[in-house]
Every structure is written in structure tokens, then in C-alpha cells.
């Protein structure tokens, strides 16, 4: 494992202006533990060394060298080392619309595409993911774009299927959706579980059960996850971390730092610096946020 033991943890979470709608990550973790959380994007993580263990779908999944950890949007999961040496990996986080555009062009999948299994043993695609990251580092837009499309197409053909549509049918699911709307609106000053349940005409335990069934997380964990998501958008917009922390309801920046790092994998300051680098380079970029769709239409 290339002498992983004793090496320090490091991570870079960034964007490349020529790949709009895609986040990038290169990391080595030993003691790092990701708390239960979700992403608005897909996660395509290629393991280079070591083993990552992540709880997904009711059980632990193990991804070792040459395999990929594949997470669909809004799917609760965790992450930690499966061996004392930790794990080293590269990951791309394409937005759902990016994956849908690629699927529409290169596969026969209908509906919203997604991954069927959370772990896939496929060293070839792992190498493709790492080549995407190298191309982004080198500023090679043609290679980065091409390799990403090839990787996503291959994964969808090997392990793709339509994502099930989430429909709110039961009274409990409707209550959970109303609770989520309240928490989104009152993120900075949320009510207690008892007060929220009272306002929705149910009991605290009934609300807790319904919310967990609907979203895979209890309300307080979901709220922390949602706060970090909103903080990311504020940081993307150039809001200082201390101000972002207060806006989303964290007591102070250290609280944001702790939760942000446990979910995103890097501190908010490092995250924002990488975003600023992309913004500074954007005038030289030929692509805008709608480039994926525009390129599809022009073909």
C-alpha cells in the first residue's frame, strides 16, 4: 500500500472551471470519520490504496483498491478507514443533471439514472477517475471532459438503473415533508422536536419515526447536514466562513468547522479558497454553468 502507515492525512476539494457541475476530491485519510450525511450530487470515488468502509442501505460496505464507492444523490451514508493504514482515493461529484445528460446521450436508461450497487470492482474506471483529476490539475479541459464522460458512461452501463421515484403517500411521509419544510425555513432558529411535533399535530416519537423513514436521518442530523449544504452555497458565493456559520444556525465558526470537515472532508476555509481560485480563473474559461446542456443541443 505504498507505505501508507504513518503518512499524514491530506485532502483537496476543488472545482475545475471547464467541468461545470462537478466537484473534485483527492484525499488520503487514516483516522478520518465521515458522519452520516448526504450529497446533492452523485459520489464516484475510486479507491487507490487501503480500504474505505461506509454504512449504506442498512449495512457496511467495503471498498478496497481497484473498486469504486458509488453513492446516489440524497442517500445517507458514512465513511471511515477499514484498515489501520487508512485509504487513499480520488472522487468526482457530478450533479444529477450532468449524469442525466451523459446517460441520455450514451445509454438506453430512462427516467432519472443512478447506480444499482454501492461498490463496484472495476480498476479500469478507478484509473479513469484519477485521470480526470490529473487532467483537471494540468488544465487539460479536453481530457478532463472526455474522461469524465467515458467513466460515467461505463459505470452506468455496468451498474446503472433508474432511480426510484420518491412519492409522499402516507400520512407519516406527509408529516415528515412538512417538518422538513419548517426546518429549512427556520434553519437558524429551529424548534425543539416537541414543539415541531405539536405544531404538526403529532407526537415527538411519531415525528421522529416518520422523518427517519422518509429521509434516512433523524431531524437533528438532517438539519446539520442541511446547514452544511447551505453553508457550502454561501461559501461558494464568497461569504466569509464566520458569517456563513451564523447565517445557517451554527453557534460560531468553530462549530461550522467541525461539522463541515466531518461531512465535506476539508475545513470551510480551505474549501472556499479553492472556490475562489476557480472564480479568479473563470473569465478565461470557455464554459458557463449551462455548458453541458448547450453542448448537447449543438451536436
Image (cartoon, rainbow, N blue to C red):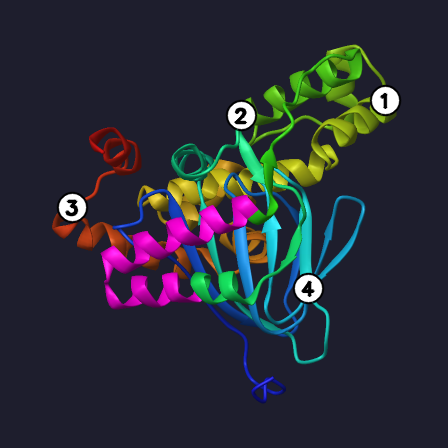
Q: Which residues are magenta?
A: 130-157
Q: Which residue does the numbered mark 2 point to in the structure image?
A: 111
Relative depth, front residue between 252 and 46? 46
- Which badge, 2 or 4, is on the more N-terminal residue? 4
Residue 36 appearing in the image: yes
- Which badge, 2 or 3, is on the more N-terminal residue? 2
Quarter of the picture containing the C terminus is top left
Residue sitting at x 63%, y 86%: 5
Closer to us: mark 2 or mark 1? 2
Residue sitting at x 87%, y 26%: 205
Crowd band around label 3 with a 10 angstrom C-alpha radius: few (<14), some (14–19), many (20+): few
Closer to us: mark 1 or mark 4? 4
Closer to us: mark 2 or mark 3? 2
**Is 152 one of the magenta-colored residues?**
yes
Horizontal arrangement in the rendering, residue 49 relative to residue 148 (left or right):
right
Horizontal arrangement in the rendering, residue 120 relative to residue 244 (left or right):
right
Determine whether the residue tagged by mark 4 lies in a helix, strand or loop.
strand
Q: Which residue does the numbered mark 3 point to in the structure image?
A: 286
The picture places residue 164, in percent across and down from the top left corner, at: 65, 27
Q: Which residue does the numbered mark 1 point to in the structure image?
A: 206
- Which badge, 4 or 3, is on the more N-terminal residue? 4
Determine whether the residue tagged by mark 3 lies in a helix, strand or loop.
loop
Determine whether the residue tagged by mark 1 lies in a helix, strand or loop.
helix
Which dot marks residue 80?
A: 4
Do labels 1 and 4 touch, CB within 8 Å? Answer: no
Determine whether the residue tagged by mark 2 lies in a helix, strand or loop.
loop
Crowd band around label 1 with a 10 angstrom C-alpha radius: few (<14), some (14–19), many (20+): few
Amino acid at each position: 500500500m505504498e507505505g501508507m502507515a504513518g503518512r499524514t492525512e491530506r485532502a483537496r476539494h476543488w472545482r475545475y472551471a471547464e467541468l461545470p457541475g462537478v466537484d473534485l476530491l483527492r484525499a488520503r485519510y487514516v483516522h478520518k470519520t465521515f458522519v452520516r450525511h448526504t450529497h446533492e450530487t452523485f459520489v464516484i470515488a475510486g479507491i487507490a490504496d487501503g480500504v474505505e468502509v461506509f454504512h449504506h442501505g442498512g449495512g457496511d460496505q467495503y471498498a478496497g483498491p481497484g473498486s469504486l464507492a458509488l453513492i446516489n444523490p440524497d442517500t445517507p451514508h458514512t465513511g471511515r478507514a477499514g484498515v489501520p493504514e487508512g485509504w487513499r482515493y480520488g472522487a468526482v461529484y457530478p450533479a444529477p443533471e450532468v449524469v442525466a445528460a451523459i446517460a441520455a446521450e450514451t445509454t438506453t436508461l430512462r427516467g432519472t439514472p443512478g447506480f444499482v450497487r454501492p461498490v463496484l470492482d472495476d480498476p479500469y474506471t478507478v484509473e479513469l477517475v484519477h485521470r480526470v483529476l490529473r487532467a483537471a490539475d494540468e488544465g487539460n479541459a479536453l481530457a478532463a471532459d472526455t474522461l469524465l464522460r467515458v467513466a460515467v458512461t461505463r459505470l452506468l452501463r455496468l451498474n446503472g438503473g433508474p432511480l426510484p421515484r420518491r412519492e409522499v403517500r402516507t400520512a407519516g411521509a406527509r408529516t415528515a415533508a412538512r417538518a422538513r419544510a419548517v426546518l429549512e425555513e427556520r434553519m437558524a432558529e429551529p424548534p425543539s422536536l416537541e414543539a415541531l411535533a405539536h405544531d404538526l399535530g403529532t407526537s415527538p416519537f411519531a415525528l421522529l419515526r416518520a422523518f427517519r423513514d422518509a429521509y434516512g436521518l433523524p431531524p437533528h442530523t438532517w438539519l446539520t447536514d442541511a446547514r452544511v449544504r447551505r453553508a457550502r452555497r454561501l461559501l461558494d458565493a464568497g461569504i466569509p466562513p464566520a458569517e456563513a456559520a451564523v447565517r445557517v444556525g451554527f453557534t460560531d465558526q468553530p462549530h461550522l468547522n467541525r461539522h463541515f470537515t466531518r461531512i465535506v472532508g476539508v475545513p470551510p476555509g480551505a474549501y472556499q479558497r479553492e472556490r475562489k481560485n476557480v472564480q479568479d480563473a473563470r473569465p478565461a474559461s470557455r464554459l458557463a454553468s449551462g455548458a453541458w446542456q448547450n453542448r448537447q443541443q449543438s451536436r
